[in-house]
Amino acid sequence: MIRTPSQIWAAPILLGILTTIGLIAALLGDGGWDLVSAVTLGAPVLAGIWYGLRRAPRRQ
């Protein structure tokens, strides 16, 4: 299966953007910014947990 560069890099770029938004939101202030920071910084963590716990496909 051949994958294009956009298929390969889409998820890492999205996670990087979310992390950047989360770090900036954490620096900006309290209240709603804390929620934005928690959600955007939690997304890469959840993605890592999901990827780590999924089962590898069976090979024949």
Image: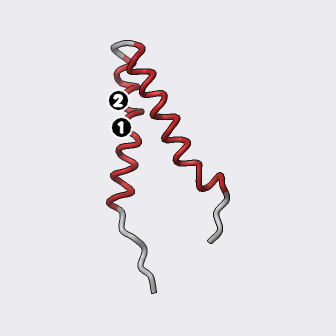
Helix, strand or loop at mark 2: helix
* Res 54 → quadrant: bottom left
Seen at 38% across and 12% down, the residue is 29
Question: Does 50 sit above or below residue 18?
Answer: below
Which residue sits furthest top? 29
**Image label count:** 2
Q: Where is residue 58 in the image (x, y as percent from the top left)?
A: 41, 79
- Which of 36 and 45 lies nearest the eye of the viewer? 45
Which residue sits furthest bottom? 60
Report the residue marked by disc 1: 42
Q: What residue type is labelled 2?
A: Ala
Helix, strand or loop at mark 1: helix
Looking at the image, residue 44 sits to the left or right of residue 2; the answer is left
Q: Do the residues labelled 2 and 1 touch (CB within 8 Å)?
A: yes
Q: Residue 38 bears which disc, if any?
A: 2
Q: Which amino acid does label 1 sit on?
A: Gly
Question: Does 32 sit above or below residue 48?
Answer: above
